[in-house]
Structure formats: structure tokens, C-alpha cells
Image (cartoon, rainbow, N blue to C red):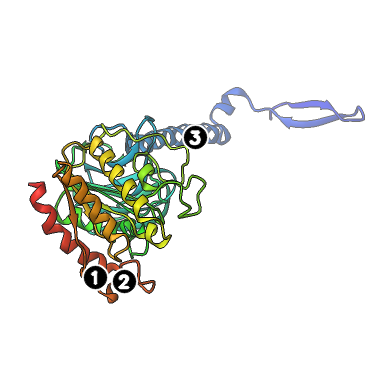
Amino acid sequence: MAPAVVGSSPIGHPTTLFYRQPTSQMAHSPMRRNLITLFLACVLVGSALVASIYFIHSSTHTILPTDPNIKYVGRWDTSSSTVAISYWGGAYLKTAFTGTTVKIKLENAVNIFVSIDGKADVLSEAANGTVDLTPQALRAGTHTLRVASRFQSDLIQFQGLILDPEAKTVAPTLSAKLIEFVGDSITAGAKDSKFALSDYAWLVGEQLHTEHTQIAQGGICLIDNIQCYATASHAGMSRQFFKLQTVAFPASPNWNFSRYQASSVVINLGTNDGEKGLSDTTFQVVYRTFIQNIRAKYPHAPIFVLRTFSGYKALPTQAVVRAINAAGEKNVYYINTTGWLVPSDYISDGLHPNDNGQMKIASKLVPILRPYLM
């Protein structure tokens, strides 16, 4: 029997604490073997954990907003390398990608419509953080992606995409033509089922297979400094059109018109000016200057000036175009919309077209615009 190890008790009496096995016996004891086994197991588990963490981080491929295969249509602030921000409703980004999944990274909550492979746009409400756009994996191959803002208050703060490990972006197909639509709530899709994506501006662009923008603001007048809506700036479209941001941003910088050139411009303004009872003379003067200022930004684009669907300011609008034509500018056109809509094409306020009314407007505009986009 091994010798006992003797120590002292708290009161000084000898006390047997434990028996010490000989070294040769300890080396082969079950306790020692168990400790060695536990240690090796911990090492293996730790290695597996490190490997799994590495796999998780290496199993995705992050695409930054600066990727050249991501194309921004509309007014976007792309001055940051980490986030691209859209302004005005209906702004969108396009790209294509390989692989079977895609996620989008968003800095703040936003309502977006997403279309993959040209399929119907799917609404993602209050999308925020990392959002899986493919809860069901796609077939392997190359896929297209479009992400659009739902309304004028929806700012897409885009931080990038997450793809499969070996996936990559591919340059998307873009039309060489772009139509810029300018207007108020009717052009912004304020009362429609899908807002910017179900109004005539979006529908026309899609039917003509061109890119399109909607520089439109609910409640806005043409004339500047009129309280058409509850914002501090009281900016009219005659001023705000030339800004990066909407009227929600009184200190908006000017828009850099070298970013893109519109192939055609369609203007639908005057309804709110008419409802406010603003002077026809003032309206006419401001409208003419506004068109001239647009011409300075887009030297070659045909400009189409719509009679408002309700008929507000129809006569001074037509007079503006006639005066511009008489002065030698022949690439500005007045479009008479009389009879395009009937009462059932409006929502209950009798002012905003419903979805059917928006589709009817688009069906009238498409054949008018098509020859100018050839």
C-alpha cells in the first residue's frame, strides 16, 4: 500500500489527506487517460469551431455599392464607397449575378420592390439590414436583379449584395434610352396600388423597354414659394427639379446632369397650381422659363408637355408651348389629354387616377413617344 501523506488539521492535529499513487501507476490510471481524452476532444472541437467560423465567413461573397456592374437609374448619391442612396420615387438599381442566392444589405428601413429574372415585382416592406431576396434558391446560372423604391419617401440606402462564394456580378442589359417624367402626385403614383410602380410613368417606360425616372412630388406646384404642401422650403418643381433630393431636403445640393442625359422628357404639372387658384399669367411665365431651363440641361431631348388630366391650367399650358414653338424651338410638344380618362378612372377624390386610369394614360402615351425613341 502506498504511504499516506500527512498534513495538519486546522487545530494542529495530524490528518490523512489522500494517498499518492506511484508515478508508474498514475501514468496508466483511468483518471489520467480520461483527462488526456478530454483534452484531445476539446482541441478537436475547438479546431472544428474555428473551421466552421471560417467556412461561414468564406461561404459568401460581398459586393460593394461601387461594383461597376451595378447600375443606378434615377437620382442617386453615389459619393460614398460604402452606401449609395436613392432619391425620388421609382429610382432603381440593376445588375446581374451568377449563383443561386442573393441578399441585399440596407442601412435603414425602406419599402422596395424586387424583380429577379424579369419576374413580377415583389414588395418588401420596411426592409432593413441584410435581406434575403431568394428564400428559395434559384437555379444555377446568371440572373438579373432590379431593386426599386416604392415612393418619394422611400430612400434606398444600399450597402451592397451578398452572393454565393464563387458567384460574381455581371453587367446588366440597359436601354440606351431614358425617359424622364416630371410631375406631382399623379406622376409619383401617390394613390395607386404599387405607388411609383403602378403609375403611368413607370408603365410607359416598361412598355417601351427604356430606362425611366420619376422626378415627381405629391402636392407640388410648378410655381416656386407657394405653400402647396407642408414643408419649410415651399419649393415648386420649377426649382426642385434641378436638385438631387426631394422637397423633404431643403438644403439639397444641385443635381449633376452629367450623370445621365434624358432621351425624352414628359411634364405633367399645373393641377396643384390650378387648385390653389394661382395666376394664369404667372403660371405661363414660370412654365416657359422652366422648359427653357430643362432644355439647357437636355439640349437634344424632345420635351412633351401634357394637358393636366383634370384640365387645370390647360390654356396657359398650351399657350406656353405655342410661344416656345413660335420662338423657333420646335422640339417641344403639347399633348392634349382631353377625353383620356372618364370618372370611373379616378379614385373617390376625382383627381387621382386609379390603377386602371394610370394604365389608360400609359396606353395613350406609348404610341406618341415611341417614334421619338427609335
Q: Nearer the viewer, mark 3 or mark 2?
A: 2
The amino acid marked with disc number 3 is Cys
Helix, strand or loop at mark 1? loop
- The numbered disc on residue 346 is 2
The tag earlier along the polypeptide, 3 or 1, is 3
Residue 280 is drawn in which quadrant? bottom left
- Residue 155 position, x and y percent, is 40, 46
Whether residue 251 is situated above or below residue 129 in the rendered picture: above
Which residue type does callout 1 highlight? Answer: Leu
Label 2 element class: loop
Disc 2 marks which amino acid? Answer: Tyr
Q: Are marks 2 and 1 in contact (CB under 8 Å)?
A: yes
What residue occupies the far right of the structure in this picture? 11
Residue tagged 1 = 341
Indicate which disc residue 205 carries.
none
Label 3: state its secondary structure.
helix
Q: Which residue is mark 3?
A: 42
What residue appears at the point 34 percent right and 66 percent down from the top-left corner? 352
Asked whether residue 37 is in view, the answer is: yes
Task: State the separation of the CA atoms marked 3 and 1.
Answer: 75 Å
